[in-house]
Image: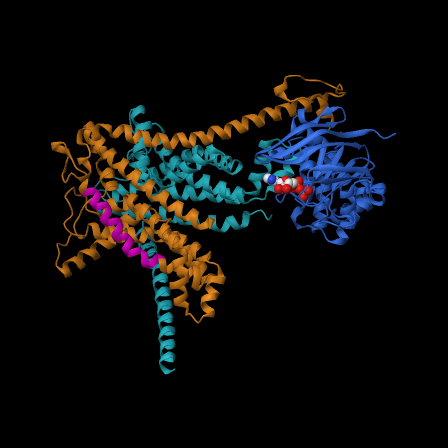
Amino acid sequence: MISMKNNVKYRIGKSTGFQALTILLACSCVVPLIFILIYILQAGLTKINWHFLTNLPKPVGESGGGIANALLGSIIIILVASVIAIPFGILCGIYLSENRKSRLAYWSRLCVDILQGVPSIVIGIVAYFWLVKPLGGFSAISGSVALAIMMLPIIIRSTEETLKLLPDSLREAGFALGLPFHRVVLKVIVPCGISGILSGVMLSVARIAGETAPLLFTAFGNPYMSFNLLKPMQSLPLLIFNYATSPYNDWHDLAWGASCILLIWVLALNIFTKLMTRKWKVQL
Amino acid sequence: MESTIVKSVDYNAYFGDNHVVKNVNIDIPRNNVIAVMGPSGCGKTTFLRGINRMHELIPGATAKGKIMLNAEDVMEMHPIFVRLKIGMVFQRPNPFPNLSIYDNVIAGYKLNGIKLPKAEKDRIVEHSLTRVALWKEVKDSLTKKGSFLSGGQQQRLCIARAVAMEPEVLLFDEPTSALDPISTSTVEELFHELKKNYTLIIVTHNMQQAARVSDKTAFFYMGELVEYDETKQMFTNPKDTRTQNYITGRFS
Amino acid sequence: MKSSVDTNLATRPSESGRVVSLKTPDTVSSTKRIKRSFRQIRAENVFRRTLIIVALAMVALVLGIMLTLIFQSTLSIKSSGLGYLWGKTWDPVRDIFGAYPFILGTLLTSFLALAISIPFSFAVAVFLGEYYPQGWFPNLLKNTVELIAAVPSVIYGFWGLAVLVPIVRSFETKIGVEPVGLGIFTSAIILAIMVIPYAASLGRSMIHMVPSNLKEAAYSLGATRWEVIRSVIFPYTKSGLFAGVLLSLGRALGETMAVTMVIGNTSLIPKSIFAPGNTMASVIANEFTEADHPVYLSALIELGLVLFLVTVVINMVGKRLVGKFTNE
Ligand SMILES: Nc1ncnc2c1ncn2[C@@H]1O[C@H](COP(=O)(O)OP(=O)(O)O)[C@@H](O)[C@H]1O
Ligand SMILES: [Mg+2]
């Protein structure tokens, strides 16, 4: 009887111990993130000012300079990528949710799954052969295409998952009013699932905003301001990579400032998405 | 003199190989309320959805035979035209959750991209809502979302939505089975009103309801139309033993 | 204003080709609306076809990626053959291309990263899935852990370079290995941080799905919390947790920038986990634009092909496991 009691005490102790360990480990996961945040804000925030945002980087040896070209380049590349990926992704998501069991849906879904796991550097290689070589040189548009490919699985998945959850009665209500298929989809189903679709779109933008690897051999980077989609273009992640791995302190400073902006941009987009999805949600 | 508005000729419906509605021939007179009765799973819903070509929306579902609307075969019309002429109300109220009450009523126009002058829209909304005895209750909250209404109000909103399109026939699939008794009686009262302008086909497995609201009753059993007659006749003196058994509650 | 006027002309389907008009429309507006309705039907068909084309394009895209990789690496496959995979030397100057150093580097960094991250991601999964499924703090933790995946990898790389490398260097001095700072070990730490969210969030949702009657059965027999976790939850979610680890692994194998920045970039076979090296992804990132002759470029692409195939297989297996689990 006594040994039994001891045994129970031991087991309870063990259980409590594991609980404590779990809590400790779980909470310590966020420590690196917090360190990184603090470090980058510290190193970067002081570098950010109007001059920094509106000027081009200075050559080696001169201090000062800014990241205007990278900032604008990033925005242009992302905009073009979004223009390509958003309609395509949403339409594909609609196909998958409207044709759940068709053979094409099966293969298409499989391809989305595959694409989701493809390393970004591989997408870069492919974009190189599809656009950079035929066009005869690095170009912003090839970078946009590479990023668009990376956006697709996120948009498609979230669109499909969102629309699948909508009740069938909604579509039937539309059809019963004599709506043609495209109006049922575009005027009833998509508006009712808009929060999920938008959140997928915004998360995909957040994801590619920081992508560097697919741009290495496509947009390539450019120390000057460029608005030509057929010419190399700078982007924030490329600038960070190039300047961070350079041996010059001035350039490191630029890279810290750029990192800070990129980080705030990406995290803000993520947090904003989380908050807005709830707000935009259509109450069924 | 009653004229036929809907008439099915050797109508058959299938889910894949599953033969669900078998050789149904029925004549539905204009401005009548027709109750469709039968045990669960006997193909009532399937038949009803065949009338406005909703059946074929389900993957693998097919149909054979004719459904005549006036002089035209529904099966040869484009479904969009069919559904503009034959409205439908579902078992569970399904207002569009992203639209206001006002927009829900004119959803058939709005979502179809049919532009109407504001005054005309107002007229349709008021008229339709009055028709379904909802106008007084919601006239001050037309901009609210339809999903905020109670179940019974939502169902009446859905009826108003169908009525707004001025169809010739209205199909109801167990329209009150998801409603409380009070809402049910409100909706039942509507049927008497609506039948002045429309022909109503109502699926119900509530015998009292069929007896209360309908002029004629069709009894389905295992996919077949077993008996079709004046409601009074059917309930007092059914000809088929299966109808008799059903009415006296001898099977369920 | 009866909308049914619309339909009087349009009584026959387009495929039958016969249009039988029963009534003549009496107003201009109704003629217009009939035309509209026919336009709608055409638009409907166009829309359906567009959807199919888009879905086909998705398949074509992935096939295209695969074929491009295969086609572009044929030169290397022909010249190095299968020996490519275990060739120990990578020397572009002498045209010798052996991928073994990079394959080893990839495996070392990825599995080391997994080993470091698994306790953490499982702890998060259990914490959020079992101990504290609700409340503001668990919610905060969940969202914060998800943010880990949102931080761009180039930022991890930069931070690693600036903060982690000096720390590792002094650690290496202490334990008496050559203090480089850059290397497999540093990369593995960065990767470990980066892949925590993948196994954690999948594991959390799996643990959520454990039927409570199973857990209650064990509790009613006098099991402690830990015993329920070990003997009910873990066995039940085994395949789901494994799938989460696979997803993490897939991410780790393909991760490029952070690793490229802190691994030291050498084509030599790493002698220990503290030595510098290269992964498949990092060598592509470093050398692709420098590859000055076709075989060299093709050899790099073959690395990409291998990476592609490996991650595809891992992700597919992971997805299958999750699918099976959620269907049961
Ligand atoms: N979506 C469906 N897919 C396959 N079979 C169905 C579907 N809906 C109904 N059925 C089959 O058709 C038969 C008739 O169903 P239904 O018309 O809904 O019956 P009721 O409305 O009279 O209860 C049922 O036995 C059912 O098995
Ligand atoms: Mg039914």
- Residue A273 within the segment the image draws in magenta: no
What predominant SS class does the magenta segment belong to?
helix
Residue at the far right in the pictured view: B1
Q: Residue at x 66, y 50 (%)?
A: B148
Task: Return the residue nearer the eye: B20 or C298.
Answer: B20
Q: Is residue A269 above or below residue C214?
A: above
- Which lettered chain is shown in blue? B
Task: Return the residue nearer the eye: C93 or A110.
Answer: A110
Residue at the far bottom in the pictured view: A2
In the image, residue C292 lies at what x, y percent?
Answer: 19, 29
In the image, residue C54 lies at what x, y percent?
Answer: 46, 30
Q: Residue at x 45, y 66 (%)?
A: C218
In the image, residue B145 lies at what x, y percent?
Answer: 65, 47
| Span colored in magenta | C101-121
- Which lettered chain is shown in orange? C
Looking at the rendering, in which quadrant would you find the N terminus of chain B? Answer: top right
- Residue C117 within the segment the image draws in magenta: yes
Q: Residue at x 38, y 70 (%)?
A: A15
Residue C296 showing in the rendered view: yes
Q: Is residue C31 above or below residue B237?
A: above
Task: Report the side of A264 relative to C114 (left or right).
Answer: right
Task: Return the residue nearer the eye: C88 or B63.
Answer: B63
- Which lettered chain is shown in cyan? A
Give the total of numbered labels. Answer: 0
In the image, residue C312 lies at what x, y percent?
Answer: 34, 40
Residue A226 showing in the rendered view: no
Q: Is residue A231 above or below residue C18?
A: below
Task: Report the side of C254 relative to B30 (left or right).
Answer: left
